[in-house]
Image (tube, grey):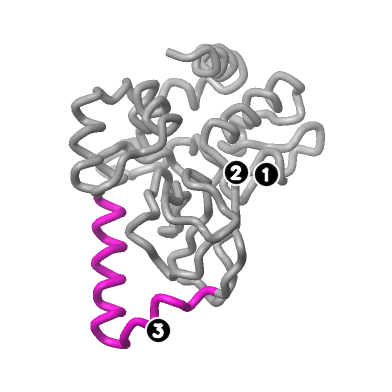
Amino acid sequence: MTDLQMRLDNLLLREAPSLAKVLRPPASSAELDAAERELGARLPDDVREAYLWHNGQETHYQVHEGQDTQWKRHPDFFAGFAWNSLEEVLRCWRLNNDCLDGLLRDYGPEQDRLVSANQRVRSDWWNPAYIPIARSNTGDCLCIDLEPGPVGSVGQMIEWFDENSGDEHPLIAVTLRSHLQDLAGRLESETLKFSDEMNCWVEAPSGREVLNGGSWSMS
């Protein structure tokens, strides 16, 4: 476990215990290797480190009311996005690849250029080099980008929209590690809090919900 991970574990136990308890046990190196074989790519070291810390999170739980059973959502580790287990990473990745294959088959290669280009993030609607490490309840994803634009960097974190209307994929952080460092820093500076009442991350002291995937340094 890295110093950052120990620091975050302590902060989460103190500041967001309801979130800390739904983080899953670590993935194994063998599980990571198997995931990489299917993805056909080596994950950045900081992404591997994160999954050796926690293999994502539990996302839902059952509530029994009389004879009725309801599924409710656990709090999201990333603001508005649940941290995917490796199994869920692969499931989302396969699903989006299948959707892309259908678009290319039905409409041709131009359908893979629905998003206007910028210099950091490519203009693909979806790219198999996007690794979906987190997912919202509407199907949008936070992805590790392994094929960035000309001035982007491999391993940058982007937000991918399930139904993109022509906007660019926003850049969330230059790396997952930097994103987690920002989270730790904001918890220590008390400019970010977890609200049990709202079941989400909020700005302090305003109490405003943090959105955009928990882009702590950009919100």
Q: Residue at x 61, y 63 (%)?
A: 119
Calculate the distance from the C-alpha at mark 1 to the C-alpha at mark 3: 37 Å
Q: Residue at x 29, y 70 (%)?
A: 99
Nearest to the observer: residue 146 or residue 114: 146
Point out the stretch of residues depicted in magenta. Answer: 91-115
Indicate the position of residue 98 as horizontal and vertical percent values: 24, 67
* Mark closer to the observer (1, 3): 3
At label 2, counting other C-alpha atoms closer than 10 Å, the crowd grade (few under 14, some 14-19, many 20 or more) is many
In the rendered view of the protein, which quadrant contains the N terminus?
A: top left
Can residue 113 be seen in the rendering of this structure? yes
Q: Residue furthest bottom?
A: 107
Report the amino acid beneath label 2: Ala
Left-right relation of 81 to 86: right
* Mark closer to the observer (1, 2): 2
Residue that carries the numbered disc 3 in the rendered image: 110
Calculate the distance from the C-alpha at mark 3 to the C-alpha at mark 2: 28 Å
Q: Are marks 1 and 3 in contact (CB under 8 Å)?
A: no
Indicate the position of residue 77 as horizontal and vertical percent values: 50, 35
Q: Residue at x 61, y 27 (%)?
A: 181
Left-right relation of 202 to 155: right
167 w.r.t. 147: above or below: below
